[in-house]
Image (cartoon, coloured by chain):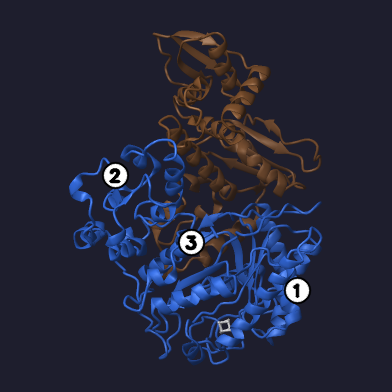
Amino acid sequence: MLSISYDSTFDGFLSVIFEIYRQHLDAGEIRPDRSTAPCNLFMQPFRVETSEESAQRLKRAIVNQASAEILDLLRVVLCSEEDGVEMKILAYLRKVFDGNDPHYAKNPTSDEMLPLYMIARAVRREEGGMLGMLRFDRTADGTYFAEIEPKYNILGMMVPHFRGRFANERWAIYDSKRGFGVYYNGQDPSQGPVEITIPDLQQVKAAAPKDDFVKLWQDYYQSIAIKERENPRLLRSCLPVRYWKHLPERQIAPSWS
Amino acid sequence: MACMDVREKLNILSAAAKYDVSCSSSGSGRQAPKGGLGSACSAGICHTWSSDGRCISLLKVLMSNACKYDCAYCINRRSNDIPRATFTPKELINLTLEFYRRNYIEGLFLSSAVVGSPDRTMEMLVQVARELRTVHKFGGYIHLKAIPGASRELLYQAGLYADRSSVNIEIPTDRALQYLAPEKNHASILAPMNFLAERKLEYHGECSRYTPKFLPAGQSTQMIVGAAGETDLQILTLSNGFYKQQQMKRVYFSGYVPLNADKRLPALTTKPPLAREHRLYQADWLMRFYKFGYDEVVDPAHPNLDLELDPKAAWALRHPEFFPIDIQTADYEMLLRVPGIGVKSAQLIASGRRFSKIRLEQLKKMGVVLKRAQYFIYHPDTPASLRRLYPEMVRPLLLPKPKSLQLDLFADQPLALPVAS
Ligand code: SF4
C-alpha cells in the first residue's frame, strides 16, 4: 500500500487520481503536503507531481461521466481540507468510472456522495458567510486590507466576488491561518489578483493609521440593537464566536456581559 | 444643532430606525457599474448580527427624526421630547460609501420621519439615492422607504434608483391604525404600494436590455404585532393579500416593544411578544417555501398560532389522516410537510430515491431531525406499531422540555431567515 503525497492543490489531487488509474497504484492514503498528521509507517511513500495535462484529462472525464457541477463540488470538497477527504473522493470516482450503474453519478444520496455533498454544503456556507463577515481596514497607502482565519480554505472561492465588487479599489485579503493571501491593484482588469505572502503580519497591522469609520461603525452597531430583545444565544448561533476576532463591532464589550 | 457632528447624528438616527425590522439585501443581482463601486448579490448577504440576533446587512438610518406626525407607537412622534437630528445628503452618502468600502454593509436602507411635507421628505430620500447612483456610480443595494402622501412622480423616481421600497402598514386593522396614528389610514398606505406594484408590472411588460430596472427587489412591508389586539389569522390573511395583490417580496413582523406611555397601547412594562413573533415568521416561512396556504396554518377555529409548537408540527398533528407518509413514494409537497424535514433534505430525498431506497441512516446524514420526523414517516425500518399517528400521544413528545422553552424558540429557525427572500 502506498501513501501518496501531492502539493495540496486541486490539480495536484487530480494528478494523483490520474496516476492511480494509469499505473494501477494501490493507494492506502493520499496526503496533501500541508498535512501535519504523522506518517503511516506501514505504507510506502510515493510522490505524484502535479501535471496540468493529467488534471485536464481527468476533469474532462469527470464532466463526461458525471457533470460540470460534480467537478465543481469536488473542488469545493477538497477545500474543506478535512483529513482523509481525498480517499472519500477517490471512492466516489471509482464508482463513477467503473460504470456498473449508469445512474450512479446523478444520485446525491449514494453512500459515497452523501458525505461529500454535506461537506460541500458546509464549505459553501462558510464561504457565503465570510463574504459578509470579512472586514477591510484602510491602510496608510489607501489599500484595503482584510485578515481572515476561516475553518476551510475558501479564499480562492471568494476572490471573484470581491474582484467584481471592488474593481476600482486596491485591496488584499490575507488568510493568516494558512499564510497566504491575494492582492488586487484596482486598475488592471486584465490582470487578476496575485498571490502574496506576508512575512510579518503584525508589523503591517501596526502600521495601519487610525480610522474614524471603524469607530462610527462600532457606534452604529451598538445603537441598532434593541435592548429589550437581547439574545446572546441567538447571536452566537448566527455569528459564531470564532469569527469575532476580526470583527471590529465585536471588539467592544457587549452590554450584556 | 448646527454643529452636531456626524457621529452624534448617526447615533440618533440609527437608534431611531432600529424598530424597522427589515434588513434584507436580497432580490437584486447587479454587476458593478463600469468605473463604479459595488454590486448586489441576489441571495443577499448578512454582514453581522446585532446583540439581539438580527442580521445587519444595510446601513439602516433615518434621514431625519423630526416628525410632524404623532403615531402612538412610534419613538419619533412629535409629542416625544427626544433629541432630533437630520443628515445632510453629503454626510449620508459619505457614510454609505466608506462603510461599503470596508465591507461593513451591502448598501443603504434609508427611511425618514415626515419633515415639512411628505413630498419634501421623499425628495430628500430620492436625492440621496440619485446621487449615489449617478455621481458616485454606486452599485450596492439601496432600500428607500416610500413616504405615504408623496407624489407619484417622486415615487416613480425612487423606483428607478432603489432596489427595494417599502411602506409599513404597521397596524393590521384600519380602525386600530386610525385610532393609534391619527394622520394615517390603510388607504394612504396602500396607495404608494399599489402605485409602485403597478409601475413595476408595466416595466416588466416592456422589459428589454435597455429599459432601466424598476425596483428589481420589489417591495416589503412591516406589521407591528401585539399592539392592537389583532389575531394571527388577521395578520396572516393580510400578509397573504400583500404577497398576492401587491407582489410583496417580504412581510415583516415586529413584536411590539413598548416605547411610549400611552393609554391606547400596552403598558410600558409589557414584554415584547417574541415567541409569537417567532411563530409568525415560521408561518410566513411555510407560506413562502413550503407551499402552505395561510388558511392551513391558521383558521377560524384556530385563529392564533400555537406558541408551544411550531406551525408545521401543529398542522401535522391536526391532520393525522395524512400521516405517516412513505418517504419512497410520497409527493415532494408531502415530504415538505413532515416536521423535521427541511427544503434541502426534501430535495435530496426526492432526487435520491429515484436511484435507490432511502434508509433511515441516510436521512440522519442529510440532517433530517429524526427525533421529530419519526412519527410522521412510514418506512420499512419503522416498527409496525408506529405506523399510525396518534396526535395526543405525539404532541407531548414534540414539545420542548418546559425549562428550555425560551431557549428552544429559535432552535429550528433557518439561519438565513433574515436575508433569504
Ligand atoms: S410618521 Fe413615521 S416617524 Fe412620524 S410618528 Fe408616525 S411612524 Fe413615527
State left or right for residue A75 relative to residue B231.
Answer: right
Q: Position of residue A207 (x, y in %)?
A: 66, 42
Q: Position of residue B95 (x, y in %)?
A: 68, 63
Residue underneath mark 1: B157
Vertical position of residue B113 compared to residue A244: above or below? below
For the residues bearing labels 2 and 1, Cβ distance under 8 angstroms? no
Q: Which mark is residue B223?
A: none
**Mark 2 or 1 closer to N-term?**
1
Looking at the rendered structure, the secondary structure element under dot 2 is loop
At label 2, the amino acid type is: His
Q: CA distance from mark 3 to mark 1?
A: 30 Å
Vertical position of residue A8 compared to residue A184: above or below? above
Q: Residue at coordinates 70% horizontally, 37% vertically from top-left?
A: A183
Looking at the rendered structure, the secondary structure element under dot 1 is helix
Q: Residue at coordinates 34% horizontally, 63% vertically from top-left?
A: B310
Q: Which mark is residue B54?
A: 3
Crowding around mark 3 (Cα neighbors within 10 Å: few <14, some 14 to 19, many 20+) is: many
Q: Chain of mark 1?
A: B
State left or right for residue B21 relative to residue B268.
Answer: right
State left or right for residue B246 relative to residue B150.
Answer: left
Toward the viewer: A5 or B311?
Answer: B311
**Mark 3 or 1 closer to N-term?**
3
Q: Marks 3 and 1: which is nearer the front?
A: 1
Crowding around mark 2 (Cα neighbors within 10 Å: few <14, some 14 to 19, many 20+) is: some
Residue underneath mark 2: B379
At label 1, the amino acid type is: Gln
Q: Quadrant of ligand 1?
A: bottom right
Q: CA distance from mark 2 to mark 3?
A: 39 Å
Q: Are the residues under marks 2 and 3 on the same chain? A: yes
Q: Which chain is blue?
A: B
